[in-house]
Amino acid sequence: MRIRVNFSKTEVIKYSSHLDLYRAWERWLRRAELPLTYSKGFKPHPHINLACALPLGFTSENDLVDIWLENTVPLDDIYQGLIHTAPPGISINYVEEIPSQTPSLQKQLIASEYIITLHKPVTELQDKINLLKNSETIWRERNGKKYNLRPLILEITSQQEPISGKQQLIIKLKAQANATGRPDEILLSLGIDPQNTKIHRQKLILDDNS
C-alpha cells in the first residue's frame, strides 16, 4: 500500500533541516505503529519519499510525503494514528492512497508557490517587479557557479496582507532537477533582504500527466 500525506511545517521547526525532517518522519511513523516497508541491506530504513527540501527558516503548507506500507490499512486509521502521535511543528492536512506505480514525487514535481511577507515597506515595489519580469537574464551565483534565474520564475505578483496591510509577494518557481528557483534569490534580485521577510511555501505543483 502506498499512501500520500499532505502536511504543514510550522514556525516551531522552521530551522530543522531536510534530514532532520526525514528522521522525524521515521520516528513518527514508528510511534504510529504503521506496518512500514523497509529497504534491503545492512541498514534497512523505511520507504519514505519527501517531495522537496525546504530551506532553513521557511514554513510551509501542502507539503507531500509518500510512504509505503506492508499491507492495507484503512485511511482513517492512518490519519488518526498520525494525528495522535504528531511531533511539535508538523500538522497533518489529509491522507490518501495512490497507485503503487505512480512516479516518485521528485519526478512529478514541476513548480512550487511561495507567499512572502515583507516586514519593512519597499518603495516602488511594483516597478522593481516589472523590471525583473521584463529582464531576459538575472545572473545569480550558487555553489560557485553562475546561473540565469529568470527562466526559473514562472509568476510573480504583489498584494497587501489583508489584516496588517504589509506588502506581500506571490511567487511561482520551477522546481525540477537542476532547475529549481529559490525565493530568497528573487528577494535579493529585488534589493530586499530575506532576513526582513517571512517566506512561506504554500503549494507544491505536480505534473498531472505523470
Image (cartoon, grey):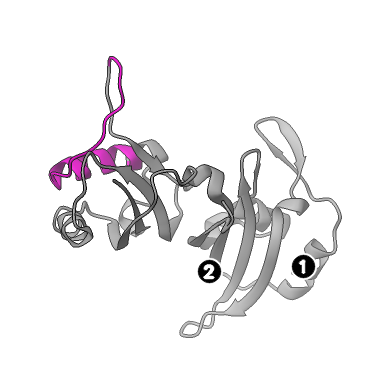
In x, y percent, where is residue 127? Answer: 79, 73
Q: Disc 2 to disc 1, how far (Cα)? A: 17 Å
- Identify the residue position indicated by label 2 in the image: 119
In x, y percent, where is residue 70? Answer: 22, 38
In x, y percent, where is residue 102? Answer: 46, 46
Left or right of 164: which side holds 123? right
Q: Give the mark, 2 or 1, whose residue is nearer the N terminus.
A: 2
Which dot, 2 or 1, sits closer to the camera?
1
Per the image, label 1 sits on a secondary structure element best described as helix
Residue 59 located within the stretch drawn in magenta: no
Which stretch did the figure color magenta?
A: 21-42
Q: Is residue 132 above or below residue 24?
A: below
Does any portion of residue 72 appear in the rendered image? yes
- Residue kind at label 2, given as amino acid type: His
Circle 1 Cα neighbour tier, 10 Å, few/some/many (<14 / 14–19 / ≥20): some
Q: Is residue 81 above or below residue 169?
A: above
Write the residue at 84% across / 51% down: 137
Circle 2 Cα neighbour tier, 10 Å, few/some/many (<14 / 14–19 / ≥20): some
- Identify the residue position indicated by label 1 in the image: 128
Residue 88 or residue 68, whichever sits in front: 68
Left or right of 72: which side holds 126? right
Write the residue at 27% across / 42% down: 24
Left or right of 85: which side holds 176? right
